[in-house]
């Protein structure tokens, strides 16, 4: 499989660090509000990548929950001023964590194969890493927190900026620090590993050399500690949106590679581009800041959004609009009708033989080619169109069912689980076919209208009829 590696700026043949399994770490949500569709697109791409790799290898897929940072603390204080700072934080983040998991489950993101890890339950891991950095003089204690020294990192011979491909060789960071979790792009600063407690904030004790420094972790240290605790170092793939490449992922690399022989946090960084809305970045001020709840007001099936994302290329900006969502819904319906052919097999085995192995190979080849899901879907659509209004040979039904399972495992569109029509609808279809055979066109048309009102359309052939959902 070939994947573009943001670390090297090249498409590379993927090889895993550990022969026993592939380790993937996905930067998860900051649970202070409902995740927007741009975040969700990132999780869809990461899920699809893991699905593709799982066709040949065991995968351990870790995703973090950022439940303590600047945003979560601020929002929890606003919403729950009567609770203690810690209780308010856990109330807020617990509620939005549950909503996040519901959202991604609706998008058929494979949570059964995920390991979730929460920042607030991993404080000891972060403190251990901070202690290590203090002991090796890569971190220092200041008046408002504990900071990572980028100057010391560079003087040790390490390259800061190799992931973001920004040149910081002449930048002076020795006297510049930043306490915010996020900051302007292309700016070099020593960043906070541990932030000392402020009035009204939740905090954890942090004993160091006989002194206590109560506070909470900085954003960047969280992911380094959580990822390596479950996957080791280096692990195989680190995924996230392109906006996380700098400073977040850059800082993760720095604080994780201070040892002389430590070159990598992850061997490959997989970054997806932004999801635009009507060719603009999402912004609350533009009133184009959408969540999955907004999607579900416009389409019955949330997998229409998953399909919309997969029709794009993860390395290019994908444009979302409700018109494109509607088109994606129609395309998904065509796939569902294709899957529904398993209920309409040709009992006489007179339909043409289909080469499932060939189309499966074409789809796999596309997905192995840097996750080219758009081309994979094009191959699927070509194959479906070649069937036309035909049926599946009964003798090929096991192959067809296996093919649907293959598609679900790879693309996550849930085609294997489409439902059959109702007994009443089947009875109407039988009555209509009898009316056609008797050339009772009036009754045949009346039954067609009745079926349409129940959501079932009909394609007529010379001596047959194929039903489909409308």
Image: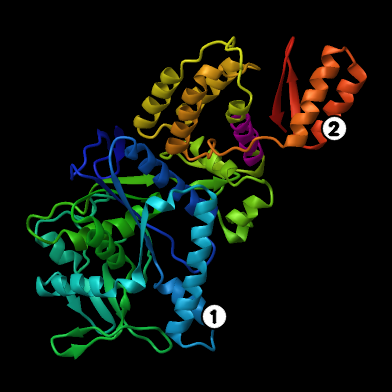
Picture quarter with the N terminus: top left
- Location of mark 2 (residue): 450
Q: Is residue 236 above or below residue 212?
A: above
Number of other residues with Cα within 10 Å of mark 2, as a class: few under 14, some 14 to 19, many 20 or more: some
Residue farthest toward the right in the current orientation of the protein: 442
Residue 384, image x and y in percent?
A: 56, 21
- As for residue 253 lying within the magenta part, the answer is no
- Residue pictured at 18% horizontal, 44% vertical: 17
Name the side, left or right, on which 288 lies relative to 110: right
Q: Nearer the viewer, residue 436 or 22?
A: 436
Residue 185, image x and y in percent?
A: 36, 58
Residue 156 image-quadrant placement: bottom left
The kind of secondary structure the magenta stretch mainly shows is: helix
Q: Is residue 366 above or below residue 211?
A: above
- As for residue 336 lying within the magenta part, the answer is yes
> Regarding mark 2 in the picture, which secondary structure is present there?
helix
Residue 461 image-quadrant placement: top right
> Regarding mark 1 in the picture, which secondary structure is present there?
helix
What is the number of callouts on the image?
2
Residue 78 numbered tag: 1
Q: Is residue 235 above or below residue 132?
A: above
Q: Nearer the viewer, residue 7 or 387?
A: 387
Q: Pointer 1 and pointer 2: residues touching (CB < 8 Å)?
A: no
Name the side, left or right, on which 113 lies relative to 75: left
Give the label, 1 or 2, closer to the camera. Answer: 2
Cα distance in 3D space between marks 1 and 2: 54 Å
Q: Which residues are magenta?
A: 324-337
- Residue pictured at 41% horizontal, 31% vertical: 372
Q: Does the image show residue 460?
A: yes
- Residue pictured at 36% horizontal, 46% vertical: 271
**Nearer-N-terminus badge (1/2):** 1
Q: Does the image show residue 175?
A: no
């Amino acid at each position: 499989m070939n994947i573009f590696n943001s670390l090297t700026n090249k498409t590379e043949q993927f090889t895993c660090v550990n022969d026993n399994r592939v380790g993937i770490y996905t930067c998860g949500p900051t649970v202070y509000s409902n995740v927007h569709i741009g975040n969700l697109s990132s999780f869809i791409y990461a899920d699809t990548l893991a699905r593709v790799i799982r066709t040949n290898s065991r995968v351990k897929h870790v995703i973090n929950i950022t439940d303590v940072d600047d945003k979560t603390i601020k929002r929890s204080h606003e919403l729950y001023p009567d609770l203690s700072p810690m209780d308010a934080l856990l109330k807020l983040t617990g509620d939005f964590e549950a909503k996040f998991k519901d959202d991604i489950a609706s998008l058929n993101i494979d949570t059964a194969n995920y390991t979730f890890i929460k920042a607030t339950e991993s404080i000891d891991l972060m403190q251990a890493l901070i202690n290590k950095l203090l002991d090796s003089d890569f971190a220092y204690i200041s008046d408002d927190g504990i900071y990572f020294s980028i100057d010391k990192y560079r003087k040790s011979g390490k390259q800061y900026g190799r992931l973001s491909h920004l040149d910081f060789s002449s930048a002076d960071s020795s006297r510049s620090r930043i306490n915010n979790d996020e900051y302007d792009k292309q700016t070099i600063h020593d960043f906070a590993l541990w932030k000392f407690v402020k009035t009204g904030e939740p905090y954890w004790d942090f004993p160091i050399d006989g002194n206590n420094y109560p506070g909470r972790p900085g954003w960047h240290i969280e992911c380094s500690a959580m990822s390596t605790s479950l996957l080791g170092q280096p692990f195989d793939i680190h995924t996230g949106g392109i906006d996380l490449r700098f400073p977040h992922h850059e800082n993760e690399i720095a604080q994780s590679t201070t040892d002389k022989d430590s070159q990598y946090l992850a061997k490959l960084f997989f970054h997806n581009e932004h999801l635009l809305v009507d060719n603009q970045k999402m912004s609350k001020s533009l009133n184009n800041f959408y969540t999955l709840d907004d999607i579900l007001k416009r389409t019955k099936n949330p997998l229409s959004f998953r399909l919309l994302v997969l029709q794009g290329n993860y390395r290019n900006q994908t444009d979302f609009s409700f018109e494109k969502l509607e088109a994606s819904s129609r395309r998904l319906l065509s796939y569902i009708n294709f899957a529904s052919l398993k209920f309409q097999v040709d009992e006489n085995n007179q339909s043409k033989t289909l080469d499932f192995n060939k189309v499966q190979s074409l789809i796999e080849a596309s997905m192995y080619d840097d996750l080219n899901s758009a081309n994979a879907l094009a191959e699927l659509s070509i194959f479906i169109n070649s069937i036309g209004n035909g049926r599946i040979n009964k003798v090929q039904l096991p192959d067809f069912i296996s093919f649907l399972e293959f598609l679900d495992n790879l693309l996550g569109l849930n085609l294997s689980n489409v439902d059959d029509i109702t007994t009443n609808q089947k009875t109407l279809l039988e009555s209509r076919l009898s009316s056609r055979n008797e050339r009772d066109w009036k009754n045949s048309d009346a039954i067609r209208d009745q079926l349409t009102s129940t959501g079932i359309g009909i394609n007529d052939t010379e001596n047959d009829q194929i039903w489909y959902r409308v």
